[in-house]
Image (spheres, rainbow, N blue to C red):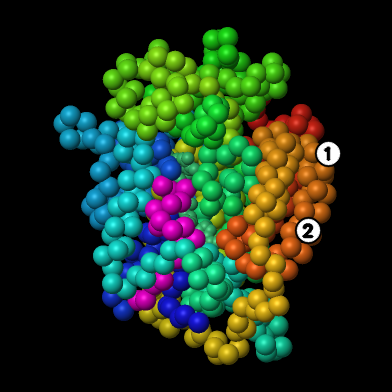
Amino acid sequence: MLQTEVLIIGSGIAGATAALRLARNPRRQITLITRASDPHESNTRYAQGGIVGRSPADDAETLVRDILVAGAGASSPEAARILADEGPALLKEILIEGVGVPFDRDENGEMNWGNEAAHTNRRILHVGDETGRAIAVALIEALRQCPNVHLQTDSTAVDLITYPHHSRDPLCAYEPIICHGAYVFDRKERTVHRHLASTTVLATGGLGRIYRVTTNPMGSRGDGVAMAHRAGARIINAEYVQFHPTALATPGAEGFLISEAVRGEGGILLTPDGEPFMAQYAPERKDLAPRDIVARAIHDQLETHGYSHVLLDLATRMPADEIRSRFPNIYATCMEVGIDITRDPIPVVPAAHYFCGWVWVDEHGRSSIQNLYAIGEVSCTGLHGANRLASTSLLEGLVWGNRTAERIEAELQEGMLPGPPPWDDIPRWDESGLVVETDPALIYGDLQTIQSLMWHYVGLVRSGDRLSRAIRELRHMWNEIETFYRATKLSDGLIGLRNAVEVALIVAQAARHNHQSRGCHFRQDTFTSQGGRLI
Ligand SMILES: Cc1cc2nc3c(=O)[nH]c(=O)nc-3n(C[C@H](O)[C@H](O)[C@H](O)COP(=O)(O)OP(=O)(O)OC[C@H]3O[C@@H](n4cnc5c(N)ncnc54)[C@H](O)[C@@H]3O)c2cc1C
């Protein structure tokens, strides 16, 4: 059993920011865990395009308006206002002046502001096309300098410890649900520890890996949402899965993101025959229309004409040396698979990318469970509504990471948090009698089935029939996997599989429940009668 004041699960931009802000008080004891062996490994690490700041030509009102328009009428105006008011100043204070992220500057030393789809102004700060890597490196380095932050890798949270669920006292059943930490699987020792904490913060990121084609790395499988759901937290907007329009469609590099900044810098989409097509779908903004519209337009082209991909042309729109210096990572990765983006168009398809909904939180990151906060992609502040505006998620992690830390600090100072429960009241993790070792083939096979079901039936274009079919099959798999889980020794893969099927069901059920097409949730069976936007 381990005890800490604040347990933060996840070391991406949200978790790292919260830890860094809490660590300013030297009396605080913070434990930051990640399932990965490398603390940089996260969705944050792969972010390319950049993070929204405030360029001289920009103002908070315009950013709020852009967020609300992209969100298709479902973004919370309050959340958008918080982000627009606080975000740019925090970016400067924490990322630029605090941890020294080397954002690109022009020859005069001024910030080099980038553009992306659905933004009115050039307002995006970037570090080449590896912005996320630069942010992750700077934040983790800063955390390593904090003596009161214990950074623990190879540690997979399995479940939250909540009362009354884990209490032996029957009278706890009449109390509100309260979180006291988490059961954490040590991947090296292969044992589960009880991590008790006064406050727990979920910062576990997204779940792109429940889809067959995704831009997300391996660990993005919805662990935090599944844990929160099992504990009884309120989950909202789960149907709003954002598909990025342009992921590389070349064997060996499937899912590699071709940043929206490529279209922001002039790149245009073409059919395989070289014809531009976005004007048919979005006459005004064309290739710079919101993500949901561009992704569905590409999907429509693929379905209607049987294409395996469409093309994204930057070569004829930007000089070769500028392409190489603005997009070095995209250039190098495409070269590895035989595509020279300074000469050739890039074959692309849409891919599952970002989750706009999930664990409901208030303006301070508080979930519906006492002492449980959620920040970053695992949370739903309402900011992204039904469709996220590009480059706002890193900023959301920063803003709510900071707000949550401030709230926790205030609660700890005011003594508002209940003390830990009696140690012996929390049951040890019991694996006695389990002899079956995890079978990797079963885990891999089941995960592939889930990914395929989600891709075909709960994808970019949905219908009641497809969703019902997905739910029936996912329920069957949930039963099988739960039985397998209860009989098998724990592993990180097994934890992920159990969570993946749980969150896949949550997405499919939310999508079936919501008949109204909006933003990235598109129901072809009810679209005409409900008047959603797009094609
Ligand atoms: C390819 C790509 C490009 C992107 N580009 C941009 C961009 O340009 N601009 C932008 O704003 N957004 C971008 N995004 C989205 C953005 O990167 C993410 O939304 C954001 O980084 C999420 O941050 P986070 O801190 O919430 O989660 P993450 O950065 O994903 O961190 C999650 C952490 O939780 C840990 N974790 C997960 N499960 C467990 C568990 N069970 N136990 C312990 N630890 C666990 C992980 O190991 C990791 O440390 C991009 C995303 C991708 C995938």
Left or right of 413? Residue 478 is: right
Report x, y in % for residue 12: 43, 55
Do we see residue 391 in this rendering?
Answer: yes
Mark closest to the chain's N terminus, 1 or 2: 1
- Which numbered disc covers residue 298? none
Front residue of this view, candidates 148 and 429: 429
Report x, y in % for residue 32: 42, 67
* Residue at x-position 78% and y-position 58%: 480
Element type where label 2 sits in the image: helix
* Residue at x-position 47% and y-position 30%: 258
Q: Does residue 461 lie above or below 472 as drawn? A: above
Element type where label 1 sits in the image: helix
- Which numbered disc covers residue 465? 1
Alpha-carbon distance for marks 1 and 2?
23 Å
Do we see residue 74 in this rendering?
Answer: no
Report x, y in % for residue 343: 40, 14
Residues in magenta? 28-45
Q: Does residue 348 lie above or below 230 as drawn? A: above
The residue under label 2 is: 480
- Report the amino acid beneath label 1: Asp
The verdict on label 1 being within 8 Å of ligand 1 is no
* Residue at x-position 62% and y-position 61%: 495
* Residue at x-position 59% and y-position 63%: 491
Q: Is residue 399 magenta?
A: no
Front residue of this view, candidates 89 and 30: 30
Q: Does residue 261 lie above or below 184 as drawn? A: above
Q: Residues within 10 Å of mark 2 (few under 14, many from 20)?
A: few
- Report the amino acid beneath label 2: Glu
- The majority secondary structure of the magenta stretch comes to loop
In which quarter of the view is residue 6 placed? bottom left
User: Of the residues tagged 1 and 2, which is closer to the observer?
Assistant: 2
